[in-house]
Amino acid sequence: MPEPQPWDDAAGGGAISGAGAGGAMDLAMDEGATLEKTPGGPGGTGPAGKPRSLWSDAWRDLRRNPVFIISGLIILFLVVISIWPSLITSLDPLDCDLAKAQEGSQPGHPFGFDGQGCDVYTRTVYGARTSVTVGVCATLGVSLLGGVTGGLAGFFGGTWDALLSRLTDVFFGIPVVLGGLVFLSVVTSSTVWPVIGFIVLLGWPQIARIARGSVITVKQNDYVQAARALGASHSRMLLRHIAPNAIAPVIVVATIALGTYISLEATLSYLGVGLKPPAVSWGIDISAASPYIRNAPHMLLWPAAALAVTVLAFIMLGDAVRDALDPKLR
Amino acid sequence: MLLEVRDLHVEFHTRDGVAKAVNGVNYSVAEGETLAVLGESGSGKSVTAQAIMGILDTPPGRISGGEILFKDRDLLKLGADERRTVRGREMAMIFQDALSSLNPVLSVGDQLGEMFVVHRGMSRKDARAKAVELMDRVRIPAARERVGDFPHQFSGGMRQRIMIAMAMALEPSLIIADEPTTALDVTVQAQVMDLLAELQRELDMGLILITHDLGVVADVADKIAVMYAGRIVETSPVHAIYEAPAHPYTKGLLRSIPRLDQKGQELYAIKGLPPNLLHIPPGCAFHPRCPQAREVCRTDVPPLYTVDAERRSACHFWKETLDER
């Protein structure tokens, strides 16, 4: 789920932020010196005695950020209705009555009916499931594939790194929509998986680059060298010393990308190569409604609004997370 | 002999050519002995240390010749896995900047304990107890309460103590300290050096102290090796070198120390710049900056002349230098 609660327990925690505030006076440190335990930061808001880390700092920042709260609530709502759409609608998105086609709002059907006489409200609600599934699965796939390949390439360098860099260049050269038209037009399945697969295929190089750059930056830190000098193995250096310090930019980019993946699914579905009916998707509905925009704008308005709000929410969330994780912006 | 470096050559392959960082270094350290390696930035002292530790970045670095005998084994002939087990267990390193040498996302207890988890296969809990013990040993007050704190919550001196604790954790027989006190202020420097020296005596370890600070060296070192342009230019027991340097470069270094009795006078500085390692001057590498340079210095590389039983100098005119004072 995209809800970013795991900060608090996400492995350990970082430290860059407190260097100024935390660097206690240097002198009194011989035997018998009194313990100078740094308080929980300038505001002292942290739980008493709990050491501050990058992650707990970020989480505290986030909780106070209205952008995060608003986007978080929207996303929470989306996730809930995509799991249990029946919570807010009792109708079936595929139960349509052609006699009611294009009719406007009426009791029990607040958003009216679409061109096939299906309830627009219900279809909009069910469309969230598709979007959230595509967004979350594609982001997980992209992060995993891109994060691992990019991270390894950055760590080991050399030939594989050079190969990966050229490969990502190739992928960056493929226009996404054109690629979608080519790859997905041959797919007949109406499930979300081909679309997710396509997004992962085209999306991983972006994350791979971020992860590679981030690992290269972290790798040069003295503590990685120090760990090496004290006999740490490659896997230990990578998993324990590099990954926790290098993951923040990946999380930020992945969160923002999640929103763009949702809009990409809608774009592809709109073009007729993403999801195909009878699947329920905002993109399909927008596509079906667009010829009738003059006569029955409500058919287009609601799925389009839902799409816009969803994408916006994820991008806002990504922004808030970036602000919280990037100490330079504080 | 605990460690013997013989005719070590290290080069770096860069876009502009081959930089010869270490050009035939020889030195040795015995158990319980402290060798201070002295020299300005780029003289190859840290690169030599990295080669000994096996943490040189290859590429661009390359060890192009020589032997590193540690307990009579040539480290350069060991496989990567064997080499790794030597690191941390038998030799360890202390770095200059303790804040950047500690992982910011792990508590100091985790990092100290890691030594025991990695090398001794201890449980997390036992390793934690060991971490507290180590912190006590390097005199960090209230170690038990602070073991879960992160590096940034400690002061500079304490962080360096933690680094020392990490290096000492497995009681290695050799420690390399690469400018361990450079990042600390003067009062703390002395405390950290004392601690290091004390632990070294207790554990009877060999210590290689890399520094460009002659003041730090005088109290703790047994012998000194002065490096210039990737070469040893002078080796000597510590006191002899202060009394009468046998190489003009050492002499220049000693004269550049600010002294209380020279108040108001201009501070001496060795003229010129350290040599470009891509184009090391022919002959004696120091000759462009040397006040005593003569024709022979431009053409002939000086060998390490024997000054006396314990002293060597790579200067054609060491006798003159020694007598001149």
Image: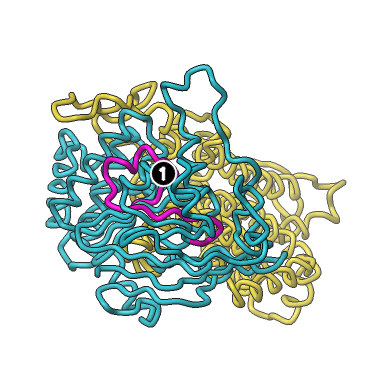
Q: Spot the yellow chain and give its letter.
A: A
Residue at (61% x, 77% y) in the render: A159
Q: Please state which of residues A103 and A89 is positioned toward the viewer in this rendering.
A: A89
Which percent across, then down, holds residue A178?
Answer: 81, 69
For residue A240, above or below residue B186? below
Q: Quadrant of residue B269?
A: top right
Mark 1 — on which chain does it sit?
A: B
Which percent across, then down, holds residue B290?
Answer: 61, 48
Q: Please state which of residues B159 and A100 is positioned toward the viewer in this rendering.
A: B159
Res. A255 visible in picture = yes
Q: Please state which of residues A207 and B288 is positioned toward the viewer in this rendering.
A: B288
Determine if the magenta segment contains residue B223: yes
Q: Spot the cyan chain and give its letter.
A: B
* Residue range highlighted in magenta: B209-231
Q: Quadrant of residue A187?
A: bottom right
Is residue A125 toward the left or the right of residue B321 in the image? right
For residue A33, above or below residue A178? above
Residue at (45% x, 35% y) in the render: A17
Q: In which quadrant of the rendered image does the C terminus of chain A lie?
A: top right
Query: Callout 1 environment at 10 Å: few (<14), some (14 to 19), or many (20+)?
Result: many
| Residue occupied by mark 1 | B97
